[in-house]
DNA sequence: AACGCGGGGGT
DNA sequence: ACCCCAGCGTT
C-alpha cells in the first residue's frame, strides 16, 4: 500500500498495530453499548440510524430513530411518504438535507433497485446523501461487506495510533488513514461474515468511549500497547487541532403575525436550498445592530416586509417578546420577535401558492419548524396567553 | 480544497 | 459563556 507511506509508519509499528487489532474485538464484546439499531439486521433500519448519527450523538438519535421506524418502517414506506412528513420526523435533529437526501435515495432504491438496499458499497455510494463513510458503515454492518468505515471518531483513533502530526482530513493523509483502516480490518475481521461489522463498530465505539477528544482513557485501551500517540506521552496532541474562524452574528426581526379574526398565524416555507431548507418558519428579515436594539426600527422593518412581501397593511403591534439566541456552526443569530395583529383576510387568498399559510395553533404542531422558531413560539404560549 | 449546513454535550 | 464535535454536497 503506497497510501500507507503518508503516515510515516515503520514496518515494526505497523505489525504491532495489526497484532493489537484482535484485542479490539474482545474489548468490544464486553464494552459495546446497547442501541436499538444494534438489535436489527434490517439494512434500511441500519441505514436510517447511520444517517441520523452523522453529526449527531447517540442519545439524541434514539427517540428520533424509534419514531421514524414506527412511522416509516421500510424503504417503500419512506419512498411513498410526503416530504412534509419526512421533515416533521426530522424536526430538531438539524442538517435537514440529510432527511431530504434519505427520502430521495429511498425513491431511487424503489425505482431502480426493486426496493432492495444495494449490497455493493460502490453502488450504495451512488445514492443521494451517501458518502464513503455511510456506504462502508451500512454495507459492512448489514451485509458483511469487507470495507472499513472511517468517521470522525475513527479518524481520531487512527491519528493517535500513528501519532499523525498533519491534518488527517487532507487528501494524502486521508488516503493514508483509509489504508491503515483497511489493514486493521483485514487483521481483525477474519473470515466471519460478522467480522467487518464488529470491527467497524468496535473502532467507532473505541473512539466514543475510550479514545475521546479531550481526556482519553488510555489505561482502558485495548490498543494501548501499539499506540504511538500514547507512547509519545501526549496522545491528545493527535490529530492537531485546526484553527477556527470567527462566527458572524446576525440580528433578525421576526413577525408573529396573527389574523385579527381567526387568530391564525402566518407561516412561510423556506427556500428549497440553503439554511433550514424546506422548513416552515415565521416571516423575518435581517436588521442591523442599531435597528435590532430599536423597537420602532424593527416594527418598521416588519411592516415593510408584511406589506411588500405579503400584501398585509395596517398591522397593529401587540407586544414584543424577549429576544431568542440561537447558535449554528457557522452563524450566531438573535431573533427579535414582535407579535402583530393583521386584518388582511381579503388579501389572504392563495398568494405565494404553497409557500405561505395561515395556520391555527393546533396545526402549527404538524409543521416542521426550526428549533430557534420553536423557542420563540414556546415563549409566546408560555405566558398565559394564546 | 474550501465552504455551507444544526444542534447538543462537556467544562 | 465558552469550548468542542462532524459527513455530504456544492462550488
Image (tube, coloured by chain):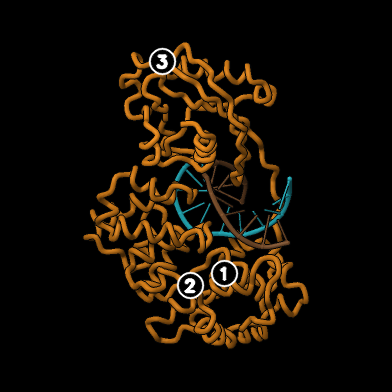
Chain colours: A orange, B brown, C cyan
Indicate which disc residue A343 carries.
Answer: 3
Residue sitting at x 35%, y 48%: A86
Marks 2 & 1, CB-CB < 8 Å contact: yes
* A32 over A357 or under it: above or below: below
What is the x, y in percent for residue A294? 67, 21
Tag 1 or tag 3, which sits nearer the N-term? Answer: 1
Circle 1 residues within 10 Å: few <14, some 14–19, many ≥20: many
The answer to which image quadrant residue A49 occupies is bottom left
Numbered mark located on residue A154 in the image = 1
**Mark nearer the N terminus (2 vs 1):** 2
A301 sits to left or right of A230: left
Tell me, yes or no, if residue A355 can be seen here: yes
Q: Secondary structure at mark 1?
A: helix
Binning the other alpha carbons within 10 Å of mark 2 as few (below 14), some (14 to 19) or many (20 upward) gives many
Depth check: give the residue in front, A305 or A339: A339
Disc 2 on helix, strand or loop? loop
Chain of the residue on which disc 2 is drawn:
A
Q: Chain of mark 1?
A: A
Quadrant of the snapshot with the N terminus of chain A: bottom right
Q: Nearer the viewer, residue A225 or A163?
A: A225
- Find residue A134 and report its image quarter: bottom left
Q: Which mark is residue A148?
A: 2
Give the total of numbered labels. 3
Image height check: is A233 above or below A127? below
Seen in the picture, residue A8 relative to A13 is either above or below; the reply is above
The answer to whether dots 2 and 1 both sit on one chain is yes
Q: Circles 3 and 1: CB distance less than 8 Å?
A: no
Q: CA distance from mark 3 to mark 2?
A: 60 Å
Amino acid at each position: 500500500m503506497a497510501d500507507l507511506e503518508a503516515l510515516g509508519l515503520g514496518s515494526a509499528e505497523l505489525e504491532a498495530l495489526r497484532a493489537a487489532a484482535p484485542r479490539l474485538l474482545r474489548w468490544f464484546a464486553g464494552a459495546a453499548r446497547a442501541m436499538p439499531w444494534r438489535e436489527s439486521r434490517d439494512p434500511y433500519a441500519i441505514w436510517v440510524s447511520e444517517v441520523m448519527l452523522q453529526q449527531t450523538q447517540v442519545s439524541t438519535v434514539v427517540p428520533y430513530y424509534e419514531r421514524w421506524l414506527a412511522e416509516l418502517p421500510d424503504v417503500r414506506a419512506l419512498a411513498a411518504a410526503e416530504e412534509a412528513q419526512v421533515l416533521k420526523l426530522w424536526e430538531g435533529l438539524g442538517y435537514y438535507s440529510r432527511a431530504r437526501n434519505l427520502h430521495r435515495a429511498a425513491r431511487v432504491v424503489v425505482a431502480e433497485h426493486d426496493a432492495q438496499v444495494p449490497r455493493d458499497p460502490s453502488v450504495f455510494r451512488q445514492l443521494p446523501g451517501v458518502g464513503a463513510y455511510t456506504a462502508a458503515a451500512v454495507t459492512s454492518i448489514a451485509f458483511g461487506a469487507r470495507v472499513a468505515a472511517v468517521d470522525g471518531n475513527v479518524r481520531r483513533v487512527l491519528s493517535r495510533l500513528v501519532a499523525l502530526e498533519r491534518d488527517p482530513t487532507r487528501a494524502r493523509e486521508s488516503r493514508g488513514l483509509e489504508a491503515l483502516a483497511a489493514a486493521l480490518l483485514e487483521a481483525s475481521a477474519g473470515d466471519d461474515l460478522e467480522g467487518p461489522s464488529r470491527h467497524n463498530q468496535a473502532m467507532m465505539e473505541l473512539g466514543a468511549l475510550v479514545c475521546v477528544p479531550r481526556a482519553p482513557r488510555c489505561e482502558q485501551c485495548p490498543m494501548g500497547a501499539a499506540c504511538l500517540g500514547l507512547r509519545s506521552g501526549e496522545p491528545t496532541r493527535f490529530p492537531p487541532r485546526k484553527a477556527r474562524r470567527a462566527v458572524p452574528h446576525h440580528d433578525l426581526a421576526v413577525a408573529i403575525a396573527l389574523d385579527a379574526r381567526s387568530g391564525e398565524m402566518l407561516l412561510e416555507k423556506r427556500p428549497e436550498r440553503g439554511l433550514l431548507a424546506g422548513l416552515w418558519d415565521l416571516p423575518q428579515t435581517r436588521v442591523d445592530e442599531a435597528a435590532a436594539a430599536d423597537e420602532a426600527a424593527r416594527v418598521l422593518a416588519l411592516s415593510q416586509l408584511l406589506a411588500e412581501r405579503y400584501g398585509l397593511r395596517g398591522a397593529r403591534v401587540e407586544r414584543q417578546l424577549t429576544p431568542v439566541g440561537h447558535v449554528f456552526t457557522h452563524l450566531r443569530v438573535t431573533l427579535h420577535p414582535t407579535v402583530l395583529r393583521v386584518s388582511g383576510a381579503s388579501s389572504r387568498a392563495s398568494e405565494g401558492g404553497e409557500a405561505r399559510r395561515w395556520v391555527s395553533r393546533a396545526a402549527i404542531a404538524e409543521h416542521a419548524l426550526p428549533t430557534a422558531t420553536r423557542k420563540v413560539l414556546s415563549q409566546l404560549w408560555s405566558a398565559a396567553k394564546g
